Amino acid sequence: MKGILTKHDFWLAVLFIIFCVFYFGISSSMDEQIVAYPKIILTFLLLLSILLLFRSHKSMNNQEEISKEKAKKTISILLIIIGYLFIMNFLGFIVSSGIFIFTLMTFVKSRWHWGWRLVASFATVGIVYLLFAKVFYVPLP
Amino acid sequence: MELSLLTNAVVSFFDPQILFFAIAGMVIGIVIGALPGASATMGITLMLPISFNLGSEAAIVLLTAVYCGGIFGGSIPAILLKIPGTPASAATMFDGYPMAQKGEASKALLLTVYASTFGGLLSGIILMIGAPLLAMIALKFGPPEMLALSLFGISIVASLASGNLLKGLIMGTLGLFIATIGADPQFGSPRYTFGNLNLFEGVPLIPVLIGVFSIPEALTMMLNSQEPMGKMHKIKKRFYLKWKEFSSLLPTMFRSGIVGSILGITPAVGPEVATFIGYNEAKRAAKGKEEFGNGNPKGVVASESANNAVTGASLVPTLTLGIPGSAAAAAVMGGLVIQGIRPGPALFNNDPQFVWFIFVSFLLLQIVMFIAGSLIVNVSQYVLKVPSFFLGPCIIVLSVVGAFAINNNFFSILVMFISGLLAFILNRYGFSPIPFILALILGPQIEGELNRTILISGEGFMNLASYLITRPISLVFFALAFITFFVPIIQERRKTKK
């Protein structure tokens, strides 16, 4: 829906304005010399956000339809990613990445058999480990 | 030009290590480009951790090979599945898919190899001629000219990169602000770091690049993984075309290649724009216009020559002015920055050997693309069978590796995910991440040049204004930036009123 302002643009404009006000607040407690340039940029951002707010307010009825199912799926994928980052600290890169690929494939209803999914997940991580850590000496998490 | 620079560059390219990365990068680029949903820019960002540990010559060869291969590879699913692998191949689909329906899939694929190589060679020559000339002019620029030029670059990107000018400007301005996070360049005092030492040197660029260009693509792949794939057309094994099959198409390749090169030099006008303009230009010039869209080989070569001509040309402003010519060129520039190489006019004086290596290697990479492309198109149906439910998670794991490798800390992984998630959400509502990335790259340069200009002119707006009047070139760029910034806003406003 590029090029068409919607209700979501109104709320995004509000978020941008809050962002600018927040950083203006922080800037006020800092040395004027070091925040002079960022404040000019913030002023521009604030003006543009206000412009977006006014324009999108006029088209509040233009509402994009977002499938609830897709929204749920997106949030679930993000939760799996957060879980991946969390367990990486305990299980290390190889095990956590293998579990992550397997879990995500299972979640998005991969048509592969679970055994094949498991093999593909850990084989991929194994290849990444060999290629990056052993061949190109890239440090892994 | 010294002949020794040219010969040294050729010799360096045939060093076994560099040749290996040229071939490997090209194959990886073609495969990534061929996977629907994965872009050339994403391919480059995923290669950044590997390039980080290589010498500067091997690194630039790897990144530019992925760039060229990625743009070419996008044409394969456009022809076989009617799904462009990258937005740059959208116009290839118009005539490529009907050719495949007529049983000419192999010919269409080989035509894309020939046209891509032709466009790439043309843009390589333009890079070789145009970049030193532009650098020679840019070397005479002082801080006010560089400041004005950078502002002009951002304003043009904001107005072109997105369908909505206002949203593009917001993203550009946001990028400029995020670039101010970290130590102040004049006094070294921390700004907006909240006591986090990881932010002292600023928001890390490479994790942001990886996040913005990889995470949204991986998420989209997983969200759409249940959608059925179209019927794939079979390929007869063929490795070359006869002269009579493509000789009549050479003028079309040339015309679209020139169009693509001109568009490539313009900041942020990427191959996705060039492919349509190149195609339309060929259609406009052709006699049998009604044949376009029904499997006309001219349509295939026009779009492919145009999009590949962007690759080399987009490196002209990237190398000479430090202003990326496309999103992928911004990623290549990121790769140069982590090598400690700052693109700009001074690079041509300080390291001419490296600059000439880039020119020569770019031209030789087109030959690598021709050979690799002619072979890979024959097995491309296997590449297209890789399912997106498997690719998505793999891209995320590779992004984690890439983000961590640059600074060896977990903070970079968080930056990568947060920027990727924000890019995914904002892009969903028409806020293109390209102006944001460009502003993030150019931000420190703009602030530095502004500080230097004020230092010369003296503080105060009047002093600055009276100094700028004495610098006509900067005035021209300021005026252009002003026009690019405000005129479309006024035009849009008038349209809305009507």
Image (cartoon, grey):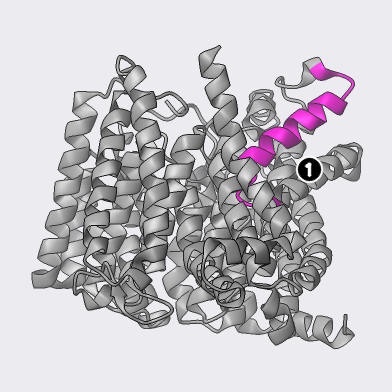
- The chain ID associated with circle 1 is B
A41 and B335: which one is in front?
A: A41
Question: Secondary structure beneath disc 1?
Answer: helix
Q: On the rendered structure, is A141 left or right of B124?
A: left
Magenta segment: does it hold B280?
yes
Q: On the rendered structure, is B382 left or right of A123?
A: right
Q: Residue at x 29, y 23 (%)?
A: A7
**Residue B357 x/y as whole percent:** 72, 78
The quarter holding residue B123 reads bottom right
Q: What residue type is labelled 1?
A: Val
Image height of B280 relative to A98, above or below = above
Crowd band around label 1 with a 10 angstrom C-alpha radius: few (<14), some (14–19), many (20+): many
Image height of B65 relative to B38, above or below = below
A71 and B181: which one is in front?
A: B181
Residue underneath mark 1: B259
Q: On the rendered structure, is B113 left or right of A35?
A: right
Q: Residue at x 30, y 47 (%)?
A: B422
Q: Which residue is drawn at 79% across and 15% down?
A: B290
Image height of B192 relative to B432, above or below = below
**Residue B206 x/y as whole percent:** 41, 67
Magenta-colored segment: predominant secondary structure: helix
In the image, the segment drawn in magenta is B266-289
Q: Can residue B252 be seen in this view?
A: yes
Q: On the rendered structure, is B263 left or right of A124?
A: right
The number of discs equals 1
